[in-house]
Image (cartoon, rainbow, N blue to C red):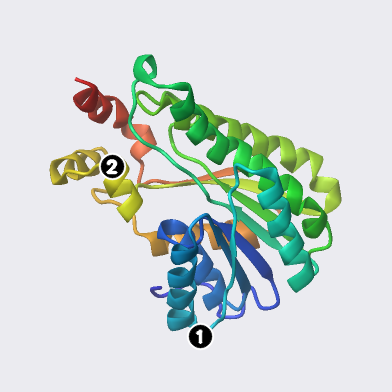
Amino acid sequence: MGESPFRDDLFAGCRVLVTGGGTGMGLAFATAFAAHGAQVAIASRNDEHLAAGAAAIAKATGAEALTHVVDVRDSESVAALAATLESEWGALDILVNNAAGNFFAPVAEMSENAWRAVVDIVLDGTFRVSRACHPLLCKGRDASVVNVVANYAWGAAPFVAHSGAAKAGVLNLTRSLALEWASHGIRVNAFCPGVVPTEGAKANLFPAPEMEQMITDTIPRGRLATADEMALQVLWLAASDYVTGECLVADGGQWLAGNPFYTLGKQIAD
């Protein structure tokens, strides 16, 4: 990752789990924590992604990441992940719920399976992983949960309604858990990143170069985000001892300027 404003040992001794940590932003989050002294575990449905992600973390930081194949849609799979963390570490200090899925689809043409595929990963998956990791977080040091949302969670999500509804649910869940778990010594916050041109985002949301430019034109800062700069925001949330129940938005001012999904989705639907 690039230059960091945080000291190198900020998370020394901390145990961190990042779901969806084998690729994209999740990998950047995990790498940033490892670069600042943390022990890192990455979880994903894809074993190849995990192997490549662990290799990338080792190359960038010299740290060995713990990997675990998990399907956040399945409670038994999530329970197995928590059991592995308990066996390996005994406790968990930081959880980043990053696993997600999204694609354009008008609601009138959306199948039940398409709706469920996204909601089950984004909302239900965040619930399952948070619940399973709660006992470990209770034994953690200054425990913190960061849930990744999107800037349409508090507005409209045309043509990505499954994702919008799920992210809105995650935002509410974040605030509910912040209150429920405050007395357990656990802070819970949400992070809303800007648009990062990961391979997944390019394939599912803006496969054509002109579509990427359309999104860029909606961002007052005039550019897409980078995964490394988004990772720094997650580090700040995880380290800020007095912040809980908040949503940190780092989208270059995009949500203030308007919602790009209506224009993009309408083009695809038409």
Residue 36 appears at what percent x and percent y?
56, 76
Residue occupying image coordinates x 55% and y 75% = 34
- Mark 2: which amino acid? Ile
Say which residue label 2 marks: 219
The image quarter in which residue 160 lies? top left
Position of 242 with respect to 115 (left or right) is: right
Residue occupying image coordinates x 53% and y 66% = 30
Observer-nearest residue: 153 or 63? Answer: 63
Residue 266 appears at what percent x and percent y?
24, 23
Observer-nearest residue: 188 or 240? Answer: 188
Residue occupying image coordinates x 24% and y 42% = 206
Residue 175 appears at what percent x and percent y?
68, 37
Residue occupying image coordinates x 39% and y 60% = 227
Residue 196, can we see it? no
- Mark 1: which amino acid? Gly
Residue 213 appears at what percent x and percent y?
17, 44
* Residue found at the very far left of the displayed protein: 210
C-alpha distance separating marks 2 and 1: 35 Å
Which numbered disc, 2 or 1, marks the residue that appears first in the sequence? 1
* Residue found at the very far top of the displayed protein: 108
Q: Secondary structure at mark 1?
A: loop
